[in-house]
Image (cartoon, rainbow, N blue to C red):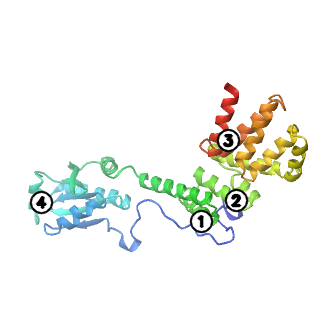
């Protein structure tokens, strides 16, 4: 999606600025290599023990005369730099600073010890392959992207809460930030479309969810938003709700009018009232429109969501009616 179809390339009255970032934050370009430092016996407490309380620290015990050290060092540094801050690497020359290695019982080098929360947590010895180093870091720091995924989920939760509270612009900014980090995030796409619906930009919302990859288009959340758009479009053609209410006041058994009113109330956000009208039709005439009131109520549930209070309440009443 790009240009006019980019769902976060615009605003709902105020210019959006989706600039949030996720995951471990890389150092500025000028600080390349800042994930790797040397330490001394005097600085070991600060560089390793204290630092490891904030993020895992790998300590590389090496010596200039060690051939395997020379094999391991470039591979180790490469993997640590590519981890972009998930771990730090601290190098200690045991010829100049032998005491720490002695205290840890290190008898051969190269030896790499991982410190977490101020304590040794794991380690390996020898010039191991790159794949093994990556596995070691994943074991210590968690799989790559795990922190980012957790942060994205937290941002999505916050965006949903903002949208529910009517803070459309703020919610759209957060959904847009997620889409910058993960352009095919189904929750963010559906949430952005919901923001557009709330801002009465229905056509733009539909365009946002058009021409998606097949698997993404099948997502239940995206399908629910598309059904919501269909319901809004249908409700616009159903007439004046005030006139329908007057009709029902004089003719309570006008089920067609009641069904239309339920559809209009639904798109107005009056979910409980919409459900009650459909349930009333079912109580009076289950055969109306080939059980159309029940089918319509189930369509509402798909859009409202399984956990929505209106869904929970109406489903309970529907079950009591069907199985009593």
Instruction: Tell whether label 2 touches label 4 (CB within 8 Å).
Output: no
CA distance for labels 3 and 2: 18 Å
Q: Residue at x 90, y 46 (%)?
A: 247
Mark sitting earlier along the chain (1/3)? 1
Q: Could you say where residue 23 lies in the image, as x and y percent from the top left?
A: 43, 59
Disc 4 residue crowd, few under 14, some 14–19, many 20+, Cα 10 Å: some
Mark 1 to mark 4 CA distance (whole Å): 51 Å
User: Residue under circle 3?
Assistant: 302
In-image side of 2 versus 203 (left or right): left
Q: Nearer the viewer, residue 6 or 71?
A: 6
Is residue 6 something that shows in the picture? Answer: yes
Q: Which of pointers 4 and 2 indicates the residue nearer the eye?
A: 2
Question: What SS does tag 2 mark?
Answer: helix
Q: Earlier in the sequence, mark 4 or mark 3?
A: 4
Q: Identify the secondary structure beneath mark 4.
A: helix
- Which label's residue is closer to the chain start, 4 or 2? 4
Q: Are marks 2 and 1 in contact (CB under 8 Å)?
A: no
Residue identified by numbered label 4: 100
Residue 109 lies left or right of residue 318; in this view the side is left
Left or right of 286, for residue 272: left
Label 3 neighbourhood size at 10 Å, few (<14), some (14-19), many (20+)?
Answer: some
The residue indicated by pointer 2 is 198
Q: Which residue is mark 1?
A: 170
- Residue 10, placed above or below residue 211: below
Quarter of the image with the N terminus is bottom right
């Amino acid at each position: 999606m790009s240009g006019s179809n980019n769902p976060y390339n615009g605003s709902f009255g105020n210019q959006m600025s989706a600039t949030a970032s996720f995951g471990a934050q890389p150092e500025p370009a000028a600080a390349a290599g800042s994930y790797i430092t040397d330490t001394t016996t005097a600085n070991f407490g600060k560089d390793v023990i204290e630092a490891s309380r904030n993020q895992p620290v790998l300590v590389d015990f090496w010596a200039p005369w060690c051939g395997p050290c020379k094999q391991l060092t470039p591979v180790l540094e490469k993997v640590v730099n590519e981890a972009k801050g998930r771990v730090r690497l601290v190098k200690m020359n045991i010829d100049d600073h032998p005491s720490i290695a002695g205290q840890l019982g290190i008898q051969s080098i190269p030896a790499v010890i991982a410190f977490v929360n101020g304590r040794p947590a794991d380690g390996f010895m020898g010039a191991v392959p790159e794949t093994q180093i990556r596995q070691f870091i994943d074991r210590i720091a968690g799989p790559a992207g795990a922190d980012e995924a957790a942060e994205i989920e937290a941002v999505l939760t916050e965006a949903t809460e903002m949208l529910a509270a009517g803070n459309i612009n703020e919610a759209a900014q957060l959904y847009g930030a997620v889409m910058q980090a993960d352009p095919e995030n189904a929750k963010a796409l559906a949430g952005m479309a919901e923001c557009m619906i709330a801002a009465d930009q229905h056509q733009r919302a539909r365009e946002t969810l058009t021409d998606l990859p097949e698997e993404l288009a099948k997502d239940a959340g995206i399908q629910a938003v598309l059904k919501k758009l269909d319901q809004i479009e249908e409700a616009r053609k159903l007439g004046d709700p005030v006139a329908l209410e007057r009709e029902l006041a004089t003719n309570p058994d006008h089920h067609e009018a009641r069904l239309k009113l339920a559809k209009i109330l639904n798109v107005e956000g009056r979910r409980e009232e919409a459900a009650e009208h459909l349930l009333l039709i079912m109580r009076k005439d289950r055969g109306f429109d080939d059980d159309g009131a029940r089918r319509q109520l189930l369509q509402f549930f798909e859009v409202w969501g399984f956990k929505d209070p209106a869904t929970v309440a109406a489903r309970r009443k529907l079950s009591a009616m069907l199985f009593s």
